[in-house]
């Protein structure tokens, strides 16, 4: 019996020409894939379609009673356009779904967790050139062959501890920061292990966004912060130097670096809401039942 997934395009238009090939690969791997091609919105062609159509297609996937997993084709930009357009009261009546994606999809992860308590997977997406390196880990989760994962860590700063426990929440820093103070960001991160990553930013912009986390006080009660890769950085500072400065500004919170997730080929999946434990230089998580 094949596993049914919905493949959606809530963000940017897929222009790599990889999507049809990836659908074929998923079908060869034993999955039944439902995907509706999106007609271009010529008024704003950077997105896969108009916001209303993208919201409608995503809502249909999230309400599909036969589906457990909704997989995003890619990230990019535009997912946050959909947040006020989704019928949240109606979605509360639907069977919970697991959304798969990262980067711009972070806004959907945050909203689905905040509004509905649905737990998504921050991980690789099919219509990207890095999918082959992360595919096996995602497919194992979709098949139910595993409900756990782990990443390696490097402690940063004096507050880092050998042992930390909490629940996972996070994603792309530049996507999460603008959600603070909206109905789509948790009112409290008490007990959370916050994970962050980003691409194409400058040190100044990263620290400005980090200041928003600090000054909004959303970090109160956070058990630990794990920062993944900062790729395609502008400026002369290294990613490690930026992480060290972030840790210096949060001396009360255990702080760690990881090279195992982010906009990189080896983008290890992290399941939002899963129980996580840091032991030494390893973070492990388990989805539970």
Image (cartoon, rainbow, N blue to C red):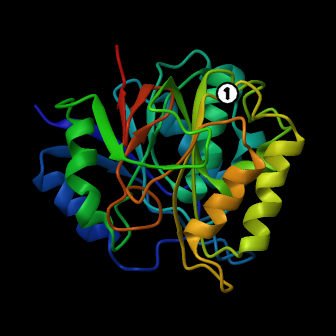
- Residue at image coords 21%, 29%: 144
The crowd level at tag 1 (other Cα within 10 Å; few <14, some 14-19, many 20+) is some
Q: Which residue position holds label 1? A: 114
Q: Secondary structure at mark 1?
A: helix
- Residue at image coords 32%, 74%: 18
Q: How many numbered callouts?
A: 1
Residue 41 appears in the rendering = yes
Residue 161 locus on image (x, y percent):
51, 33
- Residue at image coords 65%, 79%: 237
Q: Nearer the viewer, residue 22 or 263?
A: 263
Q: Quadrant of residue 32?
A: top left
Q: Quadrant of residue 1?
A: top left
Residue 97 locus on image (x, y percent):
45, 29
**Residue 30 to residue 125: above or below:** above
Residue 51 appears in the rendering = no
Left or right, 269 with reference to 239: left
Q: Residue furthest right?
A: 215
Residue 68 locus on image (x, y percent):
36, 29
The quadrant of the image that shows the C terminus is: top left
**Residue 161 to residue 24: above or below:** above
Left or right, 2 with reference to 266: left
């Amino acid at each position: 019996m094949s596993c049914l997934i919905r493949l959606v395009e809530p963000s940017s238009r897929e222009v790599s020409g990889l999507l049809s090939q990836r659908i074929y690969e998923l079908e060869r791997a034993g999955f039944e894939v439902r995907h509706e091609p999106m007609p271009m919105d010529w008024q704003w062609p950077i997105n896969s379609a108009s916001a209303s159509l993208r919201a409608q297609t995503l809502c249909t996937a999230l309400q599909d009673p036969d589906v457990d997993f909704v997989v995003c084709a890619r990230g990019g930009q535009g997912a946050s356009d959909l947040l006020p357009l989704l019928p949240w009261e109606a979605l509360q009546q639907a069977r919970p779904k697991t959304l798969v994606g990262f980067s711009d999809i972070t806004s959907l992860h945050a909203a689905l967790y905040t509004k509905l308590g649905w737990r998504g997977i921050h991980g690789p997406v099919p219509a990207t050139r890095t999918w082959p390196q992360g595919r096996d880990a995602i497919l194992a989760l979709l098949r139910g062959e595993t409900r756990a994962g782990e990443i390696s860590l490097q402690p940063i700063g004096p507050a880092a501890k050998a042992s930390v426990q909490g629940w996972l929440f996070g994603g792309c820093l530049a996507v999460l920061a603008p959600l603070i103070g909206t109905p789509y960001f948790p009112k409290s991160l008490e007990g959370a292990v916050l994970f962050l990553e980003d691409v194409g930013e400058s040190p100044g912009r990263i620290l400005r966004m980090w200041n928003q986390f600090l000054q909004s006080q959303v970090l109160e009660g956070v058990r630990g912060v794990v920062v993944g890769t900062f790729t395609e950085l502008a400026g002369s500072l290294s990613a490690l130097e930026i992480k060290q400065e972030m840790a210096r500004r949060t001396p009360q919170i255990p702080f760690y670096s990881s090279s195992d997730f982010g906009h990189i080929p080896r983008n290890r999946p992290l399941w939002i809401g899963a129980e996580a434990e840091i032991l030494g230089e390893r973070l492990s998580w388990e989805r539970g039942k």
